[in-house]
Each structure stands twice: as structure tokens, then as C-alpha cells.
Image (spheres, rainbow, N blue to C red):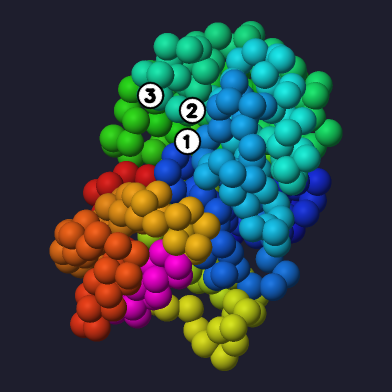
Amino acid sequence: MQELATRRKLLNGKVNFPLCLAPMVGLSHMALRVVTRDYLPAGAETLWPTEMLNSWKIPKEDLAKTPETFRAPFETGLVPQILGNEEEPIRDTVTRLIDWGAEAIDINMGCPVQKALKHNYGVALMGDPAYAAEVVRMTVKHSPVPVSVKLRAGPQGDFNFLLNFVRGLEEAGASWVTLHPRTAEQKRRGSADWEQIRLLRESVSIPVIGNGDVQTAEDVFQMLEDTGCDMAMSGRALAARPWMMWQVAETLGFGAPYGREGERAPRTPEDEGQEYGRALKKLLMILLETHGENLALRKFRFHVRTTGVWLDFGHALYSAVMTAKTGEGVQEALDLFFKTRVAMTPRTQLRE
């Protein structure tokens, strides 16, 4: 595998770890970031996303009271992801987010939902390379921190289109890009075309983060080896097994996470199943402490529905969580379910 030391620098050289969490609506909130960070050992630095933030809304919101912008006081490396295509709201959003603690700003050019297409942001910007570059230029103009872009493959998987598109973003001042090599039409269907990540990494001078079909620690190293990308990004699979951070760190020679000294990262399906239960209990506790019971339970149920597909009998766990009506009831359901050892499967058909 290409030595990490030879990889291009991210976040002004601060990042020294090859895996990060993806920005995901409803999932990449403060509670998940804190739980995932608990598995990252001392000395390891990576990028930490937010959920997608609308640049028309952020300037008017109280960021300390908006669930999508809740943050823990000790969080570093925060890279909020914004949707937007107009200079004034982007300028005001960047100003608010810098004050909030952003260490970089990520622009979403990969969201394929109809609302984004209708308003000409998200993946819709990939239909207009010149304007997409202008969105980057106006963001960079108002940002004292690095600006990155997350995007998808070009239309019909056209790599030449993608390359020219990214070169425009690079010229406009993008510090790095993240490529999820599926087209907007594919959404999560089919396999991610890692070859496009490799070709892009070889063709531009800014760092390239690879995203798509990273479900295990082995996948992280395989993506780094196959594509030469500067970092691997994982979404729902890392939300399901946040200790993937620990597994990767262990392979790289980092120590154990704080509080787990002397332990090894969970590796067997049964050990991972038990760790999933521990992670869920902590996630629920943080959500209840920070979001209030109704919103906390909605977010927790969504997390279980999304990540439980990696767990044997995950449907039974989701049913138990849905049946419980209070935070205390959900805690009891978790205790009862994880009294029996259950296993996790390495991969599912749910594409990343």
C-alpha cells in the first residue's frame, strides 16, 4: 500500500488518518460523531462532517439550538457541508460556520434528491461546470479555511467530463474533492467505480478522497491500495461499526482508544455484535441528553433502521426499538436484545 506519508495533505497537513465519516442527512450529527470519535486513538486526526446544511437557512438560525449544528465543545476537525448556489447566503453561512468552529467548508455537489435538482444545487451543479466552479470561487472568496467539494461521477460515468469538471473546481480554489463514483441516476445502486477515483487522483494535483462501498476496515486499505486516494470515506457502514476507526488504527500501529487500553479492536462477528450494542447505548444516551426525548427517539430509530442491516436479527431490534415509547423503554429494549450474543455481517447488499 502507498505509504500514508506520501499522500497529499488535507486540512493544512493536520490530518494523519486515512478514514473519515461521510456527511449523511439524519445520521452525521453530533451524537454519532462523538461515539465514532471514541474509537479514534490519541494522536489520530481526521475530518468530521455535519449533516447537509442549507445556506439559505443557516444565517437565520441559532446554531446552538439547531439539531443539525449541535456540537460538543471538544470537537475538532469539523467540516460542515453546505448546499448553496448564491453568493450572499453562502457568504453569510460561511461567516456563521467559521464562528461556530468550522475548520473547512464542504460544498455538496452530489445530492441527487429532487429538491436539490429543482433548486439547482447538490448534484444539479454538475450539469453546469462553469457555474459549479463559480460556486467554489465565491465560497473560497469568503472563507479563511479550506473549501472542498463532494461530488458524483459524471453523466453516464463519463470520466472526461468528470476530469474537466474537477479541474474547473481546482482552478477555482477547491482544496480537495471527495468522489462517490456512481452517477446521480444510480444513487446507491450498482458498485462504485473505484477506477474513476484512481484516474482522478492521477490527473489532478489536489487531494482526492474516495467514497463508495467501504464497509469494512479491509475495504479502507483496499481502496487506498487500488486507487491511491488520499483518504477513504465511509457512510452508513461506519455509522454501523464506528470501531472501524479502531480497526484501521490498530493496523497502522496506533494505540487503543482512550479507556480501552490493553484491549484489541473487535474483529469477530460476535464481538462486533456486542460492540454494536455498546455503541447504540452510548448513542441513545447522548441523543437523550442533547435533543429531548421525542427528537432523540426519532433520530435513534432512524439510526437503527439504517445500520441494523449489518446485524443478525436487526429487524427484530428495530421492531423492539419502535415498540418502546420512551427513552427508558428503548434502553430496556437494548438491554434485553443484547443479553443474547448476536453477530454482525461484514457486508450487506445495501450499497454505501
Q: Which residue is mark 3?
A: 113
Q: Name the residue at 35% across, 55% down.
A: 297
Q: Is residue 104 visible?
A: yes
Q: Which residue is mark 1?
A: 180
Q: Which residue is mark 2?
A: 110
Sequence-earlier tag: 1 or 2: 2
Q: Report the magenta stretch's main SS.
A: helix
> Would you place residue 14 above or below residue 123 in this image?
below
Q: Which residues are magenta?
A: 269-285
Q: Name the residue at 63% across, 9% down.
A: 131
Q: Name the residue at 64% across, 8% down.
A: 130
Rendered location of residue 54, percent (x, y): 56, 27
Sequence-earlier tag: 1 or 3: 3
Label 1 sits on a secondary structure element that is: strand
Rendered location of residue 173, percent (x, y): 76, 25
Quadrant for the N terminus in the image: bottom right
Q: Amino acid at mark 2?
A: Gly
